[in-house]
Amino acid sequence: MLVSAKDMLEKAREGKYAVGQFNINNLEWTKSVLLTAEELKSPVILGVSEGAGKYMTGFKTVAAMVRAMMEELNITVPVALHLDHGTYDGCYKCIKAGFSSIMFDGSHYPIEENIEKTKELVKVAHAMGLSLEAEVGSIGGEEDGVVGLGECADPRECKAIADLGIDFLAAGIGNIHGKYPENWPGLRFDVLEQVKAAVGDMPLVLHGGTGIPEDMIKKAISLGVAKINVNTECQLSFAAATREYIEAGKDLKGKGFDPRKLLAPGADAIRATVKEKMELFGSVGKA
Ligand code: G3H
Ligand code: ZN
């Protein structure tokens, strides 16, 4: 059954581990993430960006696919189906489509407007049993058309948003979507500490999980991060494994061009990446 992400993230914060949000793009992606979570007995969040939702023909299709797949694969671990960096309209579409969690990313609005829209969406989401993530500050770089300047979150704004009754908060702390540049100075733990002091026990979300060094991940978890989003790293693993298969000419031998064979190495590579992250985040055996 799909669940809201509230309980799993509160447990994670208390237990000092993080639940991974892995963004999905198609059937193979979804199956790889679900099977790995089940194998490792880990809770998991399936992230769907608006772009990926559109690619998969729409949020209704995504929700129906995920529900049917969970049933047919006998998935028993807690799974949340979560809109990633949602717009105001996107949030309503996902609530209607049967998602179990949404992120309203109002970080590009003036804070008053972010507060106003978040407040409304919290009410609607909670009335329907969904959890809600909000964002303050911004995540640098670009993901699926969502561009951020990477400004760090203002702790007072974080408190104002947290006080609206949201379930978990994404705060910009120098994190970036996509690959980190070589001269990246690292996460701003001073900002993370101030945000934590301002919002108390609220689970915090670390976006841009691709390529953050292990020691920083562990420190972030110790400071209240309970959800870590990973997208690009699965895409890189999938692309590398698919390239290797094609460059080795395996698609030209026997029935190697069959999409079920052609996509298998990429799907296995996603499973390996998800496993590595769940082990690093400490969520293995926590379902
Ligand atoms: O919202 C999704 C994430 O923040 C993923 O970031 O692509 O850098 O792993 P990433
Ligand atoms: Zn993100």
Image (cartoon, rainbow, N blue to C red):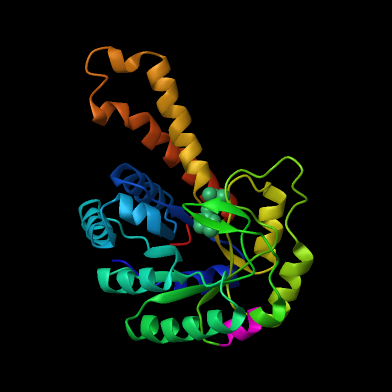
Image quarter in which the C terminus is found: bottom left
Q: Tell me where residue 232 appears, x and y as whole percent.
A: 51, 45
Left or right: 7 as drawn, with respect to 178: left
Image quarter in which the N terminus is found: bottom left
Quick check: is 161 in the magenta stretch?
yes
Q: To which quarter of the image does residue 132 belong?
A: bottom left
In the depicted structure, whether residue 266 falls above or below residue 213: above
Q: Tell me where residue 55 appears, x and y as whole percent.
A: 32, 49
Q: Tell me where residue 49 appears, x and y as whole percent.
A: 41, 57
In the depicted structure, whether residue 114 falls above or below residue 41: below
- The region drawn magenta spans 158-163
Report the residue at 25% width, 51% height from top: 73
In the depicted structure, whether residue 216 falls above or below residue 243: below
Q: From the viewer's side, name the closer residue of 201 and 149.
A: 149
Quick check: is 153 in the magenta stretch?
no
Q: Tell me where residue 67 appears, x and y as whole percent.
A: 24, 60
Asked whether residue 200 is in view, the answer is no
Left or right: 218 as drawn, with respect to 112: right
